[in-house]
Amino acid sequence: MSLVTDEVTEPNPSTEPEQVIPPEPDDLAPPTAAASLRASIDFVLVLLIAATAFKGFIAEGYFVPSGSMAPGLLGFHVEAICPSCGYHFEIGRDQGDWTPPGVACPICREHVPLEHSTIEAGDRLLVLKGLYEFRKPNRWETVVFRNPNDAGQAYVKRAIGLPGETIQIDDGDILINGHIARKTFDELARMSLLVYDQAIASRSKDAEPRLIPERTGTSWILEGDKLRVESLPARGGPEVIEYRHVDEAGHEHSITDENSYNAAYLGPEGPSVHDLIIRFRVHHDGGNGYIGVTYRLNAAQEFELKLYPARGRAELWENGRQLKVAPTPVWNGEKEVVLAYWDRRLGVRIDGEPIWPDIDMDLPATPLPPTTRPIRLTAQDFRGSIDRFRIERDVHYRPMPRSSMQRGKGSQGERYELASDAYFMLGDNSPVSNDSRSWEITTVPARLLVGKPAFVHLPTWTWRGSIFGRSLRLSIPDFGRMRRIH
């Protein structure tokens, strides 16, 4: 039976080959050419039977036609390359047959033409079947399952709610039995979406700069993807440069749940997001002061990380109050720095290692609007530079996908009660995902779980050309898209 759904497609299962029982050989007779041939045929048949058993009972391939998990898993899409900055991204084509003439680049905001784009197939998944007969899905794990409203359809989503829990969506976050559900930093990093990358944006000669000095005459100097600074000891405060976020028209705007995959049918005008990862590399050349990064959650809440390379010290501040202090090695040269706020949790990483345990913040969802300039870099008595400046965001869950909101369904904080064997499934591409928020039967019983997608395998890209005057279209293996799925 072939299943074609808006989520994943199950191929036709192969018919198991008829078992072949060869005659008993004569133990005393020397092997003949015919016997060797029979042995080779037997070996091939055994391999075919084993492959069929593996495919039918252990693993099986599925095809993804839609973008509910994009950009992590792609459905039908077109490839886009910004002519200004070179950023490569995908735009979904599973919401209809129309491809716009162009879109704005999500990084530099310059125009990206799509007139001659080619529709590419979605990802192919290798699914480990029956895994959940031995263990239950973990929260945040990607799962393939049967649609509870139509068991003939196979879907791929992320397990968010587990059996017996009460689920709510609150300002983009997930509440479990009234308490915030928090990811680990590694889970956050695997699910995050790119917002901005200075190394990519710096290739554009036409785009307006996003990193703006707080005042004229600053010692911050922007050189391509690198920010140089030579700050003097305390004299009127630190040197400050700010990141400003802009919309497609170049107007300052808060960071939203914009997903470049949806560019053909959704703009960046979604809800503002608060959960960000700020990454950069610091080069320390001299000075006894600090290099810092501040994240302004909103007009009333901010967090600041200060690093003192020459003194071997790190400080974390909240609204001018010191939260944490820790010794670090004295260092010259380079360090990779991460400041992250997600699921009302604050974390810092230096060269991939936490300086102190992540801090769970007792902050309620706030009605205060976020700022259009959420990030500041500061330096005082510091000589060096910053590069690889990059912003990512966490998945922001909407109360309902766009289609259901347009029909008047969905409300912030709606409660979903899960039975003792039921799961609550959501797609990462929350604005358009068809999932537990909008189904008539909202939860997935354990008996409908199919398995865990382990790999994206056999992805392809389309080659168009002509040979001897004849137009051809060929699907070419795209090994660069092969990857493990978490």
Image: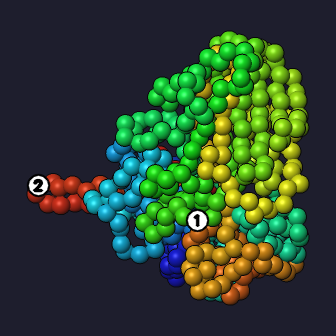
Left/right placement of residue 191 relative to residue 289 reads left
Q: How is the image coloured?
A: rainbow
Give the residue type that dot 2 points to: Phe
- Snapshot quadrant of residue 330: top right
Q: Is residue 267 visible?
A: yes
Is 438 in front, or is 216? 216
Question: Which image quarter holds the C terminus?
Answer: bottom right
Q: CA distance from mark 1 to mark 2?
A: 49 Å
View extreme (top): residue? 286
> Does dot 2 land on a helix, a strand or a loop?
loop
Check the image and report above or below for 32 versus 404: above
Locate residue 399, reporting x and y percent: 69, 73
Check the image and report above or below for 238 versus 73: above
Observer-side mark, 1 or 2, equals 1
Locate residue 346, reporting x and y percent: 80, 45
N-term-proximal mark, 1 vs 2 = 1
- Label 1 packing within 10 angstroms: few (<14), some (14-19), many (20+): some
Disc 1 designates what residue? 270
Check the image and report above or below for 280 versus 220: below
Left/right placement of residue 94 relative to residue 471 reads right
Locate residue 458, reporting x and y percent: 47, 56
Q: Residue at x 68, y 55 (%)?
A: 370
> Does dot 1 land on a helix, a strand or a loop?
loop
Disc 2 designates what residue? 468
Left/right placement of residue 204 relative to residue 13 reads left
